[in-house]
Image (cartoon, grey):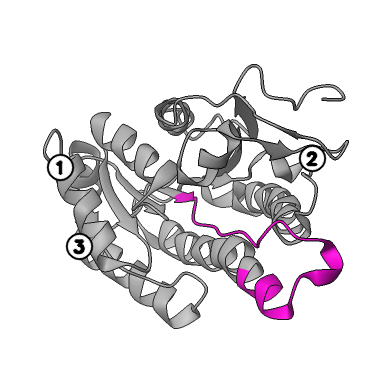
Amino acid sequence: MTASDTRSSPKIALVTGGGTGIGKAIARALAGAGWQVVITGRRQGVLDETAAAISETGPAVVAVPADIGDPASVAKLFDEVETRFGRLDLLVNNAGSNAPPIPLEDVTFEQWSGVVAANLTGAFLCTQGAFQLMKRQSPKGGRIINNGSISATTPRPNSAPYTATKHAIAGLTKSTALDGRPFDIACGQIDIGNAASDMTSAMSSGVLQPDGQLRPEPTMDVALVGEAVVNMAALPLEANVLTMTIMATKMPFVGRG
């Protein structure tokens, strides 16, 4: 693929955890904005269903299964992207998992390791893969957007594994932005609060607050997250949104809620 071919073709985006929830909303918004979208996750059936649903109203979405916590699987994923499209313009590190909301001292090593692998190691491995491809493609460069969550700055009760990894994502974002400068690779982070999805379904019945009480919390349409990512991704590489917080306006985050 030549440089002129790339400029006349749709830009290529890879969304991890793209089969459900926030990842699905991001993939749908990018496809709607004219991007050629690749979604990845561990469950082929879920990916295929999502790809088919989004493709009904826009460009065909490609589903490539991968375990982003496994270096060999990540290498295969990026080989597939390069073989199919010749380049990558956008990586959205969205995939993640959580441990049960239990006291810190009761978290098992397996629970801790699983969250670290999905939320942090996976983002690092995919960032490596994106760097390698973005540095050698022509024209070089691209953008990486990390899903940080508002837990990248402020924890919920009983959330040590998730919060620790999301704080680490903030460091990965800054290091990636710095190390990417010489190669026209921009990196930013979107911190999301209470986007309505399967993960936030319990919020309507009550969420544990720092004062020990259970209270319901407002949510927002997950499609708004997709729109925000599209806006971040649309910037020329000379500009970058380093951090963005998008949240349900009335959720108890700002202040002492």
- Residue appearing at x 35%, y 53% in the figure: 88
Task: Give the residue at the far left of this rendering.
Answer: 56
Task: Give the residue at the far top of this rendering.
Answer: 249
Magenta highlight range? 92-114
Q: Quadrant of the N terminus?
A: bottom left
Is the residue marked by circle 2 packed among few (<14), some (14-19), or many (20+) residues within 10 Å?
A: few
Instruction: Check whether the beta carbons of the residues at disc 2 and disc 3 lie within 8 A of each other.
Output: no
Q: Does residue 75 show up?
A: yes
Q: Is residue 7 above or below residue 76?
A: above
Is the residue marked by circle 1 packed among few (<14), some (14-19), or many (20+) residues within 10 Å?
A: some
**Residue beneath label 2, please?**
154
Question: In the image, what residue type sits under mark 1?
Answer: Ser
Which comes before the other along the chain, label 3 or label 1?
Answer: 1
The alpha-carbon separation of the residues under discs 3 and 1 comes to 17 Å
Which comes before the other along the chain, label 2 or label 3?
Answer: 3
Q: Is residue 184 above or below residue 65?
A: above
The alpha-carbon separation of the residues under discs 2 and 3 comes to 40 Å
Is the residue marked by circle 3 packed among few (<14), some (14-19), or many (20+) residues within 10 Å?
A: few
Q: Is residue 177 above or below residue 76?
A: above
Mark 1: secondary structure = helix
**Residue beneath label 1, please?**
55
Question: In the image, what residue type sits under mark 2?
Answer: Thr
Q: Is residue 120 above or below residue 159?
A: below
**Residue beneath label 3, please?**
84
